[in-house]
Image: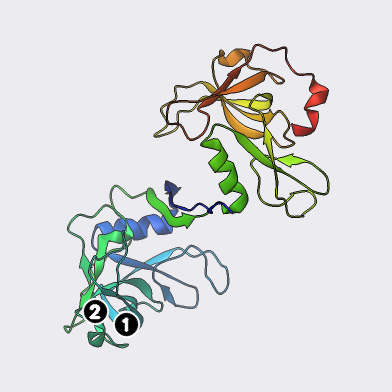
Amino acid sequence: MPEVLKAPLVVEFPFTRSLGPVQSAFLTGLRERVVLGVKTRDGRTLVPPVEYDPVTSEEIGELVEVGSTGTVTTWAWNHEPRRGQPLDTPFAWVLVKLDGADTGLLHALDAPGPDSVHTGMRVSVRWAEERSGAITDIACFELYDGESAELTGSDGRFEDMVTGIVAPARLDYTYSPGRAQSGYINALSDRRAVGERCPSCRKVYVPPRGACPTCGVATSEQVEVGPRGTLTTYCIVNIKAKNLDIEVPYVYGHIALDGADLALHGRIGGIPYDQVRMGLRVEPVWTDGGRFPDHYRPTGEPDADYDTYKELV
């Protein structure tokens, strides 16, 4: 049995979001070294602030300043900080009830070791040297044995309010395509396309998944398909993707390889984008060292009749 492939995979993108008045004031306050909470109708002060009471679901928006000092309510020690975490040395994750608040704020505590951390200890905000209006404006918490910090008297109104943030999202994991797709990928290294046939409905699926999506039974019989195929449907891309060296506009489509009962996707080249059409007969174009077809181009054959591929649209 061929070795099942696996490889590290990173999914990363910037997540952009706008802020409502409460979050805008909270993050702008951090930029100005002020911590704001929001007061509920029953007098509780929530930090970090939210726009709706988590108990009653009422809309709330009365901003109040709380202290930059507080008390640890619970904690956990982080022995091995990961990329992007607040500190690059071991630290404690802590929930801190800031003076004047009724809820805990989660952040990092810079401490020499787990023996120095305990519930009920006093801590203080360590502000980042450069602040932009983000939770990272609080660099971390640090040990503190002084009096409660004095308030600035802020009412939550600032100049040049922060109205939006960009938060990077990233997921690192090891991906294994499994037995069926490992066979498909290995065949691509020989510039062949291999699917698997369902023993029940006899349909051939490319790329294979190891089971028939219609019948739900396992598949194992390999079937070589293509290399030519029929363009079943397509779209014209007019927005250039970051890190993709393809000029717009270009065409991306679903291609039913000859002998396959499932269309796969690929870029269509070798033809002006406004001449691409359903039923176009295409073939793969490989580049030197390419692990999969770079794009598909017209074969010059007559277009396929719609009835031959209508079930794959």
Residue located 45% across and 28% down the image: 240
Residue 263 lies in quadrant: top right
Q: Residue 300 vs residue 63: left or right?
A: right
Nearest to the observer: residue 149 or residue 134 = 134
Task: Give the answer, above or below, for where 267 lies relative to 94.
Answer: above
For this view, does 126 lie left or right of residue 278? left
Say if 110 sits above or below 301 in the image.
below
Q: Earlier in the sequence, mark 1 or mark 2?
A: 1
* x then y, percent, for residue 153: 25, 67
Residue at the spot x=74%, y=49% of the render? Answer: 213
Give the numbered dot on residue 124: none
- The residue depicted at 43 percent of the width and 26 percent of the height is 288
Q: Given the image, on which type of amino acid does mark 1 rest?
A: Val
Measured as percent of width and height from the top left, residue 282 is found at 63, 20
Q: Which quarter shows the C terminus?
A: top right
Give the amino acid at mark 2.
Val
Label 2 packing within 10 angstroms: few (<14), some (14-19), many (20+): many
What is the crowding at mark 1: few (fewer than 14 residues within 10 Å), some, or many (at least 20)? many
Pick the residue in front: 175 or 226: 226
Task: State which quadrant residue 101 falls in.
Answer: bottom left
Q: Is residue 111 above or below residue 177?
A: below
Q: Quadrant of residue 235?
A: top right
Are dots 1 and 2 in contact, CB under 8 Å? yes
The N terminus, quarter of image = bottom right
**Nearest to the observer: residue 23 or residue 309:** 309
Marks 1 and 2 sit apart, C-alpha to C-alpha, by 7 Å
Q: Position of residue 310 (x, y in %)?
A: 79, 28
SS of the residue at dot 2?
Answer: strand
Q: Which residue is mark 2?
A: 123
By what rule are the colours in the image chosen?
Answer: rainbow
The number of discs equals 2
According to the picture, the residue beneath numbered tag 1 turns out to be: 72
